[in-house]
Structures are given as structure tokens and as C-alpha cells.
Amino acid sequence: MEAKQWSIQVYITEEDDKTSARAVLTTRDDTHVAGVGHAHRNPADPSVPEIGDELAAARALADLADKLFAISSGDIAGCDRQG
């Protein structure tokens, strides 16, 4: 059995009350797929920066998952056309 490892790095930036995250998946053959997510804190809310980090990261990972699903769906459709 062959074990494969893919890595995901999540990069988070904050500017004022806006948080952005970029989740980058790297496969063993050096393929990169990235997802992005954003969060915006209401200025009236108490300042808890971790919430913005978590929300932006979750959205970036969800975007990454959607992109991986689209890639695999396209690969499956390509196999169907060949067979």
C-alpha cells in the first residue's frame, strides 16, 4: 500500500477589521491549488481577532474543497469521454 501526503498551508492577513486567508494545497508532484476566504468584523463587536482568523480560514478551506471537487469532476468527465 502506498501512502501519499499532501500539505495545506493557510496564510492569514489582517487589515483593520478585515481578515483574509489563503489555503494552498501542494501535492507530491508539486501541483498547487488555492482557496481564499474573507471575514469582516463589525466595528461595534468586541475585538476577538481569532474569530476572524477562524472564519476566514474556514472559508478558504471550503473554497479549496470546492475547487478540488471541480477538478476531480472534470477528470471524471474526461475519463468518461475517453472510454
Image (tube, rainbow, N blue to C red):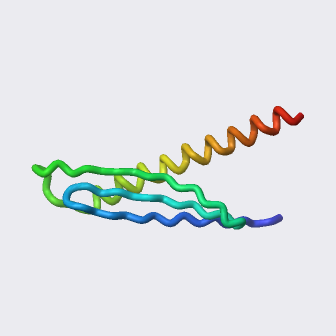
On the image, the x and y values in percent for residue 14 come to 28, 63
Q: Is residue 34 positioned above or below 77 on the image?
A: below
Residue placed most toward the observer, 26 or 47: 26
Q: Is residue 5 positioned above or below 62 on the image?
A: below
Residue farthest toward the right in the current orientation of the protein:
83
Q: Is residue 56 positioned above or below 5 on the image?
A: above
Residue 8, quarter of picture: bottom right
Residue shown at 89%/34% (left/top)? 83
Q: Is residue 4 left or right of residue 48?
A: right
Residue placed most toward the observer, 9 or 1: 9
Residue 12, quarter of picture: bottom left
On the image, the x and y values in percent for residue 59 come to 41, 49
Q: Is residue 35 left or right of residue 54?
A: right
On the image, the x and y values in percent for residue 50 come to 28, 62
Q: Is residue 10 left or right of residue 8?
A: left
Q: Quadrant of the N terminus?
A: bottom right
Residue farthest toward the left in the current orientation of the protein:
44
Residue placed most toward the observer, 82 or 56: 82
